[in-house]
Image (spheres, rainbow, N blue to C red):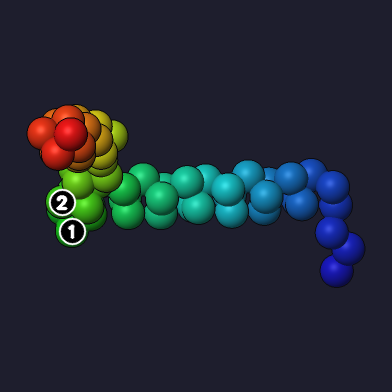
Amino acid sequence: MDIDINQLRGFTTLTTMIAFLVVVVWAWSKRRQRSFDEAANLPFSEEEERIHQRSLEETDK
């Protein structure tokens, strides 16, 4: 059985589409929502920690 370039392209497209759908299902699953919410708020928590740390340093002076 010889594989034609068009068959290879079709197989590649199908494989890529399946991989994309798997990633979409994984990203939108309920099990992942909590960790994504925590990751989304990470920049804000780091900023609050820095502000808190600065205020502690200023009171120590």
Check disc 2 and give the amino acid type.
Arg
Q: x%, y% of residue 49?
A: 19, 39
Q: Residue at x 31, y 48 (%)?
A: 27
Answer whether labels 1 and 2 touch (C-beta < 8 Å). Answer: yes
43 relative to 23, above or below: above
Q: x%, y% of residue 6?
A: 79, 44
Q: Which residue is mark 2?
A: 34
Q: Is residue 55 left or right of residue 2?
A: left
Q: x%, y% of residue 17?
A: 52, 46
In the foreground, 5 or 48: 48
Q: Is residue 1 left or right of residue 19?
A: right
33 relative to 44, above or below: below
Farthest residue in the left direction? Answer: 59
Q: Residue at x 18, y 34 (%)?
A: 61
Q: Which quarter of the picture shows residue 24?
A: top left
Farthest residue in the right direction? Answer: 2
Q: Residue at x 84, y 47 (%)?
A: 5
Q: x%, y% of residue 34?
A: 15, 51
